[in-house]
Each structure stands twice: as structure tokens, then as C-alpha cells.
Amino acid sequence: MSGHTPASFDCIDALVVGAGFAGLYLLYRLRALGLSVKIFEAASGIGGTWHINRYPGVRTDCEAVIYQYDLEEVWKDWTWKDKYPSGEEIQAYFRYVDHKLDLKRDIYFNTRVTGAKWDEPSHLWNVSTASGLFVRARFLILCTGSLSKPLIPNIKDLSTFEGRCFHSSHWPQEGLDLTGKHVAVIGTGSSGIQVIENIASQVRHLTVFQRTPNLALPINQSRFDEKEQVKMKEMDLYNHIFRRLPQTFAGFLYEFQPIPFTSATTEAQRLLWESQWKAGGFHFWLGNYPDIFSDETVNREAYAFWRSKVRARIRNPALHEKLAPIIPPHPFGIKQPGLEQGYFEVFDRENVSLVDVKETPIEQVTPNGLAVRGGTIHTFDILVLATGFDSFTSAIIDINIRGCNDVSIGKKWKNGVFTNIGMTTSDFPNLFFVYGPQAPSVLANSTSVIPRQSDWITDCLKFLQDNDYTRIETKRDAEEAWRYLILEIASKRLWHKCESSWYTGSNLASTNTRPVEMLAFSGGLPLYLEKCAEAADNGYQGFELS
Ligand code: NA7
């Protein structure tokens, strides 16, 4: 490997696609290895999802202290403002990271990768972009995000709407004055609830089109005291925190209960849930009894607790069944709950109405609104599609990636998504993904997983470099075994009890790009990391090296 950055793009060691949390970390790690590395980024700035998502109320679901790089040169002088930082604060954090690590000099913005073709004789990827830039790279590492391609619903006559219409992730970057406006939001996932609770008091009227109630949890937001952060650093707690994260199932600072719900006394169950509710965030989800994910009866108990808490906050009894129904729409926690602050109270406002699209399905868009079954037309000036994302595979498939014998990655995954533990897929040598399909646990915090996946890739490239290998390709039986393990682990939980979820791709009813199946490792971060270590420790036996 050359070990230097060439002046021209003749040939580099590694091309990273995407300048989000993962891509930036990899740039830092691979540079330190002495490789020539560049990032191509389709957007105009760093931060990935945080650069793109600008809707009102955009905020993390994880506490600031774990939503950052575990690099001492970065965290030691950085101070957070909020316990759960806003999109704006995260953008400021990324600017600071860039300043500290001097990243931008190797990043090409507004450079969308459109094609990548493997060249067997040279063991190189030939990568082309929409802007005409072309590069040959030994390794291609996709950090394109698991939720980056918007899912635009297939609603009749959507293009005929005469007002403004955009996906939540394409909120106008220059901002939008909503004063006096009639606004509609379709979708009540994490993005939808953040938009809804933030704009309800600004708009003249808000119509929310809900398909599935969000079993959202209170965030319990607060300021993150500066003195407390200084003290934590003095006490060396940050190092303990970063070392602790991969020891927990979900990469958070709390863990599932050590005993099942059925072994706890009624008093212990109730007191635990009350304290978790008060703590806020994901405590009631990821700190709960482990059997809520596998035993539907236990899950119903947790749901009943959630429902009683939520109903107590909604004044209009007619809304109870809509927002917190007696029969759960799906088991609690098998879909990521949103984190809210005042979401349920919004629906008691006079300027807010809720349309249940399961009861009255959307039939078509009209020039000034939406017609639902039964003939009612809801009119508005602005339509926000908070309808989610085509998860995991689509951002990768959208790049026309062609591996050995010109096989395309979309075709390869059409009947099942195969990847090996090391984030590569057979027929596609020297191709890696971070936080891509089938790699991390869905229950794991991405900022706990991404650095560990990136370290695996960095170590792998070092191994190849040290041993004069120029090609690595996963073995077919290894990727089949890995996929089987993912599906087997998933089958023991209640994931299949959900009609529509981006964990499995069941939310993509209309796109038909791949089978509906669990696409992420749900066996917990410690087991995932153990498997990663095994894959490397045994001399990369699941891979062909040459
Ligand atoms: P999500 O969580 O996938 O939510 C999408 C929402 O849009 C969800 O409520 C969907 O209902 C709804 N939806 C999708 N299509 C339609 C149509 N055609 N009609 C009505 N409603 C529809 O995406 P988010 O952006 O909110 O959050 C993604 C992740 O980002 C989140 O998990 C966090 O990790 C951050 P459904 O529930 O499918 O019935």
C-alpha cells in the first residue's frame, strides 16, 4: 500500500463513502494506519443524518455523554449543553470534531457515488460519481447510514399537491415560517412525533395522519451541567463510560434486569417501572425485564403500564383509544419507541386534529389536501411526510455496485441479504459496510457500535497490509452461517408481531427490493463483538485471502 495521499485520484488505499459519524471515525483511524484515504459525501457538509435532518425538534434519542466519540483528544475539551442534544448542537459537535482532527481536507462534498466496479486483475474498485470525479481504490468502505434513503409513500396523485410537500428529512434548510399555516403530518414515528410536538403551537392548524400509535416514552430532558461534566472528566469517569458501553446488551449505560419479570415480585415490578418512567429516555425499554421481548403475556403487562401513564395525560377520552388503545398495536418495544416531551398533550389542543388512517385510509392527494375514505377532504398548505426510511440496504443498492463477474449487489440481495460478520459480502471483494445490513444489534446504540465496527475494519486492513494480501472476500458458507444466526436469534423474540417496521423492512410493502427479514443482529453487543473478535482471531478463516 502506498501510505501517502496522492495528488491526483489515480489510486488510493481506501475510499470511504459518507461523512457521518462512521465515515469520519474511519477517516481518522485509517489515516493513523498510514493509508491514503478519502471520503466522498453526497451532501454539502459533515454529520450525515445530522447535516441532512433539519426539521423542528430534531434531537438525539441517546444521552449526550454516550453520543460522542470515545477519543480523549475530542471529548476532553468538549462541553454539552443538553442531556439529549438537539440536531443543532450535534452539528456544532461535528464542526468541533473536524477542527480537532482536521478531517475536511480529505473530504469531497457534493460528490455522490453512483457506481463502483470491481476490477479483478488489479484488485481495485473503480468508483464513479455524479460530479464526474473518478477514483480507483483498494478498499471501498460504505458508511452510507442505515436510515438515509427517505421512504416516500405511494399515495395517489401526490405530485398534484399545490402547496409545499417534503419528507421530514428534507425540511427546507433555510427554515420555514409556519405562522398562520395549515399543516399536515403523515407518520408518527420518532421523526413525526418530534415535528408534531414542536410545531403544534406555531401553526394555525395541524392535522396528524396516524397509522400506528407511537408507544413513545418521556425523554425527561434537562441541561447537562457543565460543572458535572468537568467533574466526571476529573474523576476519569469518561474512560469508564466508554469501556462500559460495549459490555451492555444495547450499548447504553444501563442493562436489562438480571431476572425475568416472572421471577420478580409484584412490588418489585411496579417500583422498577415507576423509577424507569421517572428516569426517562429508553430506561423503560432497554432497562426492562428481558422477557418483555419474548413473552407476549409479560409484554402485555409492560404495555398496560405504559397505557395507564399515557392515558392519564390525555384529557379528551375520545383520544384514549386512538393514542393508547386497549389492545396494543404491536408488542411494546419491538419497534423503537419515540422519545417525547409533551407529545400526547398536543392532541388536546384545539388547533390539532388526529386522523386514524387505519379507520379512514388515505385515498388520494388533492391540489390542496388529502381525501380519505368516506369522502372527507382535509385541506392544508404544507404536507410533511414523516414516513420513515428504506432501511439498511437501499442506500447501498442505489449505488450501482458490481462485483465479480459483473454481478450487481441489488440482484445478490434480492432473495435474502447475505453478509459476513466482517461486513463484507461474497462476490464483492474488499467491500466493507459500517452499520450496514446484518451487522449491528438493532438494540444497540449506534455510537457504541460504529467505532467497534470501524476498529474491526482497520485491524483487518492492517492484517492484509502486514501480510501482503491485496484481496479479501467472504466465503459463501460463512455468510450463510452468519445470516442463519441472525435469523435464529431474531426468531426467539417477538419481532414478527409487527406489521410495519424498518428493523425488518416490513415498512417497505411497496418497494419489493428484498425479502422481509431481520436485518440486524439482535443478540446484544457483547455477543456481536465476541463474534467479530472470533472472525479475526482465527486468521480470518471465514474469508478468502490472496
Ligand atoms: P419510522 O419510525 O419508520 O416512522 C415512519 C412513520 O410513518 C410511521 O408512523 C409509519 O406508520 C408512518 N407511515 C409510513 N408510510 C405511511 C403511509 N403510507 N401512510 C401513513 N403513515 C405512514 O421513521 P422515523 O423517521 O420517524 O424514525 C426513524 C428512526 O430515526 C427512528 O427509529 C430513530 O432511530 C430515528 P407505521 O408505524 O409504519 O404504521
Image: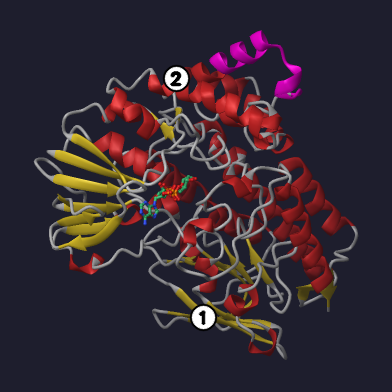
Q: Residue at x 54, y 69 (%)?
A: 396
Front residue (pair 367, 251)? 367
Residue that lies at the very extreme toward the right in this rendered image: 538
Circle 2 is placed at which residue position? 309
486 sits left or right of 503 in the view: right
Cα–Cα span, label 1 and label 2:
50 Å
Colouring of the image: secondary structure
Which residues are the magenta region?
258-275
Q: Earlier in the sequence, mark 1 or mark 2?
A: 1
Amino acid type, callout 1: Gly
**In this rendering, position of residue 152 left or right of residue 160:** right
Q: Confirm or reject: label 2 Cβ below 8 Å from ligand 1.
A: no
Give percent across and percent down for residue 134: 49, 83
How far across and down, in percent of the image, does residue 127 sit? 54, 80
What residue occupies the far front of the structure in this picture? 374
| Type of the residue with mark 2 | Lys
In the visual, does 80 lie left or right of 313?
right
Specify whether 36 is left or right of 94.
right
Look at mark 1 in the image and give the residue it sits on: 115
Q: Position of residue 249 (x, y in %)?
A: 70, 37
Which residue of the protein is positioned furthest toward the top in this rendering? 267
What residue is drawn where x is 60% and y is 11%? 271
Q: Does the stretch in magenta take in 368?
A: no
Query: Residue sitting at 14 percent across and 45 percent down?
Result: 182
Within-10-Å neighbours for mark 1: few <14, some 14–19, many 20+ = some
Res. 475 image quadrant: bottom right
Quarter of the image where one finds residue 368: bottom left
Q: Quadrant of the C terminus?
A: bottom right
